[in-house]
Amino acid sequence: MTAATDAVVGLVAPVDAGKTTLAEALLFRAGAIRRQGRVDHGDAHLDTHALERERGITIFAKQTALDHAGAHLMIVDTPGHVDFSAEMERVLPVLDYAVLVVSATDGVQGHTETLWELLARYRVPTILFINKMDLADGDAAAVRGVLARRLGAPLVAGEGLAAVCRAADRAPAAALEDAAAGAPAAALEDAAATDERALDEYLETGTLAPATVRRLVAERAVFPCFAGAALKGEGVPALLDGIAALVRQQMWPAAFGARVYRVSRGPRGERLAWLKVTGGELRAKMPLAGVTRGEAWEEKADQVRLYDADSYEIAQAVPAGRVCAVSGLTRVMPGDGIGAEAAAAPPALVPVLSYRVDPGEADITHLVRALRELADEEPLLGVRWEEQLGEVHVQLMGAVQQEVLAEELHRRFGLSVTFGTGGILYRETLTAPACGVGHFEPLRHYAEVRLLIEPGPRGSGVVAGSRASEDDLDRNWQRLILTHVLERDHPGVLTGAPLTDVRVTVLGGRAHLKHTEGGDFRQATYRAVRQGLMEARTAGACELMEPWYRFRLAVPSDKVGRALADVQRMAAVFDPPEVAGDRARLTGIAPVCEMRSYALEVAAYTGGRGHLSLEFACYRPCHNAEEVIAAGAYDPAADLANTPDSVFCAHGAGYTVPWDEVPAHAHTVIEPARLRPWRSAEEVFGS
């Protein structure tokens, strides 16, 4: 194991909380920039993209670095707008710490709670900065108390904790003196009360060791809280000192590992993979290996770059604990692990709306190529080309992302596009296991695949693995089948919506020494998945899933009856209303299709005094599945591009066998005694 004093610190906040302004103030205070820019002036150091400067919002995650009080901090500024929250979430798994910025004038907004939940999901130690205190009523302690109650977390005055850590090389008495000077001694008491070992230490010595304070912060037992006004530089020195004092030394494995969190294009159009080194050392020209979408790859890191906003310097080596950008990696995607690092969990925030893209006078194939290049940078864009209809669809978070996408297509590719009405992005899953068989044997071709498709945990996506014996099906063929399972979205058989939250297991298959080609297993795999879904449909084991919003509805208290009636009509699941004075607040989840236009209704019946906040929460069983399925009128057997039927060969000619007769014609027989323990796709590719 090797030690490093570096820390990757992400800045996260709802839009307009002052996050980028705080980044400017931190950099200026640390001497990393000579002049503090402003978002409203369009000259912020980290908002370098033309669209960011035009709109005054952060759209793309950017990194910079500063050195302060013996700590090297790599700062990552993330988007705050809800429409670009997927970009923000991709950064979280590579953070050592986060600074959550909360506006003192706005308090805990809906998106603040979402950020808080995401930071907990990724176990990111978090420091809070209450911004815009110059515009707020009340002192920092009062505002901190309100935030602590809303977030349900132990927020502790950061100055006192930082003072203890700054006294690391001094006697305990000096540490107590520093703590008392920096903040009330209650900060130590509050921190000690969160942990049994810390409490014993505090009762015995009257203080906490710096290592104990840093441990409590790193374990998310306490959350240091600072306050100030970033635009005026107030509270920024204390925050900067606090971050440098509270981060603890990280320990990294000796074996090389890295995690990719972003993909972008450089100034010359080169593909850049942004990653954090999580073990060993990354060197220029170093051979790297990993698995992307179930397919193993080996490539060489060409150029290693350390970025400061849009400028960079070329590095020969980057140690564990730092983030960098690498050219030469053409296949990695955000969330991928490299070397010893595992892939990240599926994202919590995903688009729920699908839009048709009209290319105007441009060639539609040009549009598809452009969108696929952008989807390389934003995987959740979900570009789908329905060639038979001549339509292109994309998945988006909201209207602002739609506008930015249109501007990007025009700026980078010269395309002027418009968007059709957004539709709900449904998904399909299973409620019980189903076996699928696919056979592809036109003349001089041969492949057969047997799969087991089982329900998976909510939010798990499509997971693949194998139980097939290599004595029955060669490892290379197993890898090929797994690649085809994971390389695309498989349409369901209720509405044609993408399949999700299932585990697909290779049970067996067969190849021909002379006639099998790679494309044969693609055909057999797709048909096996489809045939298994048809079996599940017949058994009533297919389920339609719909996206649900997390909503927060604030209305005048005399309108709470109307609000309750509305959300009940929308099939919402919600908590009892909170009434405080003349305001009422409702929180819960509801189907996206019911809530999409509700903000206009709220404005109408409250006379503009109501406010509705919506964010994606999860996928749940569709509340009106029969209605949606009937309206879609989807015939899975007639979808020739995704046929469940198989092709067999007899007397020198291929012939089609309907899906429900395929198992009886199949050539392979699965013997349970010959099945191996389940191995994930990553294990199969790595073996």
Image (cartoon, rainbow, N blue to C red):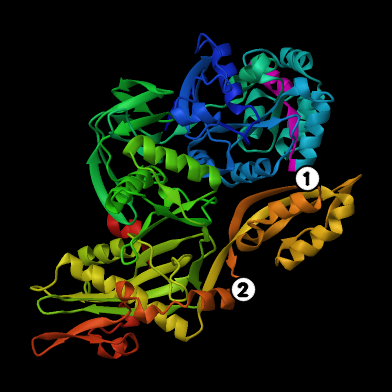
Asked whether residue 687 appears in the rendered view, the answer is: no
Residue 159 in magenta stretch: yes
**Residue 590, quarter of picture:** bottom right
Q: Residue at x 70, y 15 (%)?
A: 234
Residue that sits furthest to the front in the current view: 361
Q: Nearer the viewer, residue 545 or 667?
A: 545
Asked whether residue 29 appears in the rendered view, the answer is: yes
- In terms of secondary structure, what is the magenta stretch mainly? helix
Q: Position of residue 586 (x, y in %)?
A: 78, 53
Specify which label sits upstream in the sequence, 1 or 2.
1
- Distance Cα–Cα, label 1 vs label 2: 31 Å
87 on left or right of 465: right
**Residue annotated with mark 2:** 624
Q: Position of residue 463 (x, y in %)?
A: 41, 62
Q: Residue at x 9, y 76 (%)?
A: 444
Q: Position of residue 682 (x, y in %)?
A: 34, 56
Residue 201 position (above or below residue 469): above
**Residue annotated with mark 1:** 608
Q: Which element carries disc 1, helix, strand or loop?
A: loop
Mark carried by residue 49: none
The magenta-colored residue range is: 151-166
Q: Nearer the viewer, residue 570 or 438?
A: 570
